[in-house]
Image (cartoon, rainbow, N blue to C red):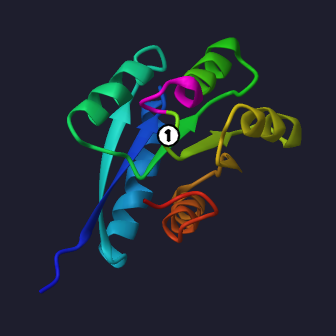
Amino acid sequence: MTPQKVLTVVLIDEDDDDVFLMKRALARLDSTAQVTIEVVSIHSGLSALSDLKTLLARGIRPYCVCVDTDVEAADSINLLSAIKCQGETRDLPLVVLTSGQEREHQVARALGADHVFTKPAGVRELEKLFQTILAGGTKLGT
């Protein structure tokens, strides 16, 4: 039996309900995909960069980093910029989930997001989002 590939998905979100929904969507995919998905949650945007660096130092390279954020808030802009500017985290695929519209999508892309999605309302929408990500969007997949 061939061992399944393990993909680590990092979720950066301070809202426990949103994290629960994302984990649930990923768990549903984990049971149907040809991969094992490990989820690492980071609940504080303030510690996100150092937490990402710690994962990398331990040899864990995320398949993608999903940041649920308001891309026009100063803290969010600083976090996205820091992830894409730091040597250790610069090349990590970055997915931004936002409740904003096209202007916020443009800001997120300008800050280095590989994919930007309008925040879905429920588990099924999240499941579709993660199916798209696992299908290997333009820059995802290592």
Q: Which residues are magenta?
A: 83-89
Q: Residues within 10 Å of mark 1 (few under 14, many from 20)?
A: some
In x, y percent, where is residue 96?
62, 41
Which residue is drawn at the image coordinates 60% and 61% (left, top)? 125
Q: Secondary structure at mark 1?
A: helix
Camera-nearest residue between 83 and 17: 83
User: Which residue occupies the extreme front position in the image?
Assistant: 87
99 horizontally vs 126: left or right? right
Between 3 and 118, the residue placed more toward the observer is 3
* Residue 85 shown in magenta: yes
Of the residues shown, which amino acid type is indicated by label 1? Asp
Left/right placement of residue 45 relative to residue 62 reads right
For the N terminus, give its image quadrant. bottom left
Residue at which label 1 appears? 18
Q: Quadrant of residue 98?
A: top right
| Residue found at the far left of this picture | 1
Report the front residue among 37 and 17.
Answer: 37
Identity of the residue drawn at 49% across and 40% down: 18
Q: Measured along the vertical axis of the image, is residue 69 above or below residue 73?
A: below
